[in-house]
Image (spheres, helix red, strand yellow):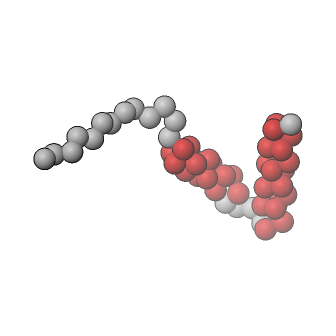
């Protein structure tokens, strides 16, 4: 007896989006010092918290 697998088209691919975001951030911080990275990431986090309110 064969099991049939129903494939549906994804409306949102979380893994793909996560990889795109990670790659974008990696490119932006590639040549930054540790202090510059921290400031950049702190700013991103602060902006995200502001948008959620």
Residue 20 in the image, given as x and y percentages of width and height: 56, 46
Q: Which residue corresponds to the image point at 32% horizontal and 36% vertical from the top-left?
A: 7
Q: Is residue 30 left or right of residue 45?
A: left
Task: Look at the picture and state if 33 lies above or below 1.
Answer: below
Q: Which residue corresponds to the image point at 52% horizontal and 36% vertical from the top-left?
A: 12
The number of numbered discs placed on residues in the rendered structure image is: 0
Q: Is residue 40 visible?
A: no
Residue 47 in the image, given as x and y percentages of width and height: 83, 43
- The single residue placed furthest to the front in the displayed view is 1
Question: 10 and 38: which one is in front?
Answer: 10
Q: Is residue 40 left or right of residue 13?
A: right
Task: Tell me where residue 17 sits by quadrant.
Answer: top right
- The single residue placed furthest to the left in the displayed view is 1
Q: Is residue 1 left or right of residue 34?
A: left
- The single residue placed furthest to the bottom in the displayed view is 34
Question: 51 and 26: which one is in front?
Answer: 51
Q: Which residue corresponds to the image point at 81% horizontal and 38% vertical from the top-left?
A: 52
Q: Is residue 44 visible?
A: yes
Q: Which residue corresponds to the image point at 61% horizontal and 53% vertical from the top-left?
A: 22
């Amino acid at each position: 007896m064969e099991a049939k697998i129903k494939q549906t088209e994804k409306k949102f691919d979380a893994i793909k989006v996560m990889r795109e975001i990670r790659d974008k951030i990696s490119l932006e911080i590639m040549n930054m010092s540790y202090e510059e990275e921290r400031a950049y990431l702190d700013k991103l986090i602060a902006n995200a918290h502001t948008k959620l309110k």
